[in-house]
Image (cartoon, helix red, strand yellow):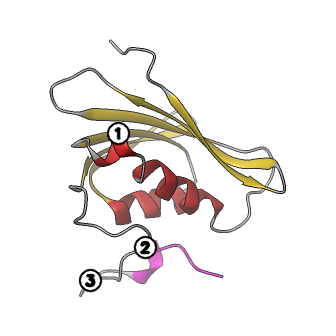
Amino acid sequence: MTDNKSRRVEIKEQDKTIAAAEVTPLDDPAGTVRTSLLPASGAAPPGSRASLVDAVMDLPEVRASSRLEATVPLGDSESLARLQERTDVSATRPTGSTALVDADTRAAGTEPPGPREPQAGESQAARPESG
């Protein structure tokens, strides 16, 4: 059960919303936050979906949580890659036209905002391209 603590996060370009998410902290002892990354109509500019994930991950309620449940449009590899960079993803599974992501968040202050450097043996192919 959730209280009405939902928050909408938007990324705008010239007063037009190009990416959005709904974020809801759940009333559970595990400190779970649920988010839905919402598809924008038309093509989103490169980097906008990664910026949306960063904006969600930087919210105080997400930084204070221990778990994240995210719903991402199927095929949104930019958002999925950024979630993998910013969390410890434990499961990703397709469900209809979306992918459900279960992840452990990192404690506030242990992971800087934005992309991290690839670790030894990590494939660059899963990382979003910049530019």
**Left or right: 131, with 4 as reference point:** right
- The residue where tag 2 is placed is 115
Sequence-first disc among 2 and 1? 1
What amino acid type is highlighted by mark number 1? Answer: Glu
Which percent across, then down, holds residue 46?
A: 68, 68
Q: Is residue 113 magenta?
A: no
Q: How many marks?
A: 3
Which residue is label 1 attached to? Answer: 61
Main SS of residues in magenta: loop
Q: Which quadrant would residue 24 be assigned to in this image?
A: top left
In front: label 2 or label 1:
1
User: Tag 2: residue type?
Assistant: Pro
Amino acid marked by disc 3 = Gln
> Is the residue marked by circle 3 packed among few (<14), some (14-19), or many (20+) residues within 10 Å?
few
Q: How far apart in space, not on screen, are marks 3 and 1 (Cα)?
A: 28 Å
Instruction: Tell me the distance, in whole angstroms, between the alpha carbons under discs 2 and 3.
Output: 12 Å
Which residue occupies the foreground of this view, 9 or 94?
9
Looking at the image, which residue is at 36% across and 66% down? Answer: 85
Residue behind mark 3: 119
Measured in 3D between alpha carbons, the distance from the residue under mark 2 to the one under mark 1, in whole angstroms, is: 20 Å
SS at mark 3 in the image: loop
Give whichever of discs 3 and 1 has the lower sequence position.
1
Depth order, front residue of 75/12: 12
Q: Is residue 62 visible?
A: yes
Instruction: Mark 2 vs mark 3: give the one in front.
Output: 2
Dots 3 and 1: beta carbons under 8 Å? Answer: no
CB within 8 Å, label 2 to label 3: no
Q: Which residues are magenta?
A: 124-131
Question: Dot 2 lies on which element?
Answer: loop
